[in-house]
Image: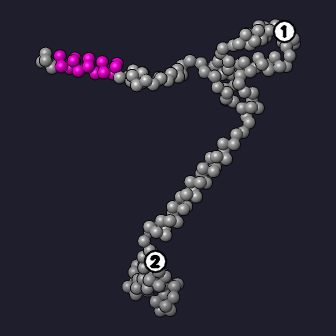
Amino acid sequence: MLRLTAGRVGSLVARRATVALTTSSARMASHGHEVSEIADMSKPMYWDRREIPLPDKRYKDILTPADESLKEKEKGPWGQLSNEEKLALYRLSFCKTYPEMNQSSSEWKTVVAGVLYCIGLTGLVIIWQAAYVSPPAPRTFDAEWQAKQVKRMLDMRVSPIEGFAAKWDYEKGQWK
C-alpha cells in the first residue's frame, strides 16, 4: 500500500516537473525563437468601432514633447486653439472619425469574386463528372422503355381501386 502511494506521488511530481520544463516559453527559448507576447484581454484596449464610440483607452499612450505641450494648452480656453490643434488633440484620443469609420471598403468585391469562383469551379467539376465519371443513364430511363412499363402495369391491372389502373378506361383504351 505504501509503495503504491509513493509511486503515485513520484509520478505526480514527475508530471509536474515535465509540464514546468516544457511550457511553450521554455520550449521556444530552447530552440532560439523569440516568444510572442500573449494579449491580456482584461486590460483596456483601443479600437475604432461605430458601436463603441468611446474606447477603453486613448489612441496614443506615449506622447511626444509636442503632444504634451498641446495637452497642456488643451487645459486652457478652447477658443485660443486653432483648428489644426483641435484636430491634433482629437487624433491623440481617436484614430478615425465617424465618416472614416463609415467609409465602405472594397472587401465585398473580393468576397463576391471568391464565391463566384467557387461556384464556377463546382460547375466545371460537375460537368467533368457527367462526361467522364458518371455511367450512362440506365435503359429504364428511355421513353420507349417507360411506355412499355406503363402498358405492362395496365395489363396487370396494378392498383385497380384507387391507384394506377383506376385512372385507365379499359373499354375505350385511354386515360379517364
Left or right: 21 in relation to 115 = left
Type of secondary structure dominating the magenta stretch:
helix
Please name whichever residue, 140 or 20, is drawn nearer the observer in this view of the structure. 20
**Which amino acid type is shown beneath numbered disc 2?**
Phe
Q: Name the residue under label 2.
A: 141
Q: Residue at horizontal 34%, vertical 19%?
A: 21
According to the image, what is the colour scheme of the structure? one colour
SS for dot 1 = loop
Residue 54 percent coordinates (x, y): 68, 22
Q: What stretch is highlighted in magenta?
A: 6-21
On screen, residue 86 above or below 51: above
* Badge number at residue 87: none
Q: Residues within 10 Å of mark 1 (few under 14, many from 20)?
A: few
Instruction: Report which quarter residue 57 is drawn in.
Output: top right
Q: Where does the image place residue 140, in percent across and percent down from the top left? A: 42, 78
Report which quarter residue 155 is drawn in: bottom left
Q: How crowded is mark 2: few (under 14 residues within 10 Å), some or many (20 or more)?
A: few
Q: In which quarter of the image is the N terminus?
A: top left
Tell me what residue is drawn at x 44 percent, y 68 percent: 134
The answer to which of 175 and 83 lies nearer the viewer is 83
Q: Quadrant of residue 74?
A: top right
Distance from Cα at disc 1 to Cα at disc 2 = 89 Å
| Badge 2 element | helix
According to the picture, the residue beneath numbered tag 1 turns out to be: 77
Query: Could you tell me the amino acid type at mark 1?
Result: Pro
Q: Earlier in the sequence, mark 1 or mark 2?
A: 1
Report x, y in % for residue 8: 20, 20
Q: Nearer the viewer, mark 1 or mark 2?
A: 1
Q: How many marks?
A: 2
Q: Can residue 129 be seen in this view?
A: yes
